[in-house]
Image (spheres, helix red, strand yellow):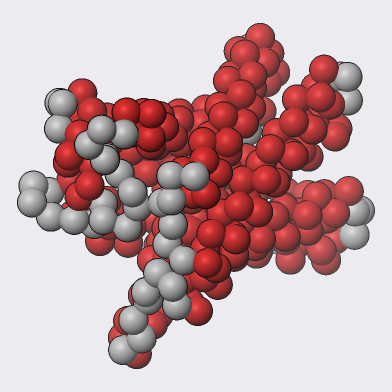
Amino acid sequence: MTPIPTLSPTRALQLGASAWFVAATLGQWAFVLFILAFFGGHTLGGDLAGLNDKPHVTGYVPGDTFGNLQFIAHALMGGIVTFSGTWQLIPALRRRWPHIHRWNGRLFLGISLLGALSGLYLTWIRGSRLGTGSNVSITLNGLLILVFATMAWRSALKRDFVRHRRHALRAFLLVNGVWFLRIGIMLAGLVLAPLGVEINYQGVVFVGVSFASWVLPLAVLELYLRVERSQRAAPRYAMGGTLGVLALLILTGSAAAVAFMWLPALSPGSAP
């Protein structure tokens, strides 16, 4: 009788991580396409007033040249850094084309730093705020991006690639906090909307999702890094399964964001 093959703990962890990466990449690239279509489309078409179709942030303000440039640059930098970051996580790129990995890494970390600084400017100086709770969350997220992007850069210069990988992964998740926020809002909406609970931008649910959009990914990463160093089978199986479940949630939230948030925002005469 042929024995039934079993999944090793290491393979289970690898499969879970791969499933998460594929799901995240699909969702993030959908977000990148939206950014390019919405922000890039309005900017290249000269319809800067159309940027105000997204009513929950301070977009185009007539006469505020510097603020308008900061707003557009911040949005487009978000698309670039999201697209760039996913490529950094592909092992084959690091092995076969290390020079591309290094230059793309410089691009990712450099734009991460600029994007965090511009985000803090837009929030606290230009005044693009949703509420006190979300302001605090955005500020902490931005400050941590500055910390971990700098640490990732410094550890790479010192050729301490173990610490570099950890700091770069933290920076990657923090930079994608704005994407995680949208996925979280969609998942919360799918659960709460049938119960008649409305999500507003100063309410407890939105503020909670705002903090969770960067705290939860960091917590999962720290658990993953611990399990990765462990030789015990049970934690590896559990972590692999957890990442698989998170991959399904990401796919669900991404599909909801495409259907209810991003595609409607691209429809003429409608706001997201």
For image coordinates 72% across by 60% down, the residue present is 219
- Residue 239: x and y in percent read 72, 61
Answer left or right for 265 relative to 172.
left
Viewer-closest of 133 and 12: 133
For image coordinates 50% across by 79% down, the residue present is 204
Quadrant of residue 151 in the image?
A: top right
Q: Is residue 246 visible?
A: no
Rendered view: 189 above or below 84: below
- Residue 164: x and y in percent read 80, 31
For image coordinates 48% across by 58% down, the residue present is 181
Rendered view: 130 above or below 153: below
- Residue 246: x and y in percent read 56, 62
Answer left or right for 118 relative to 43.
right
Answer left or right for 37 relative to 198.
left
Q: Quadrant of the N terminus?
A: bottom right
Viewer-closest of 184 and 129: 129
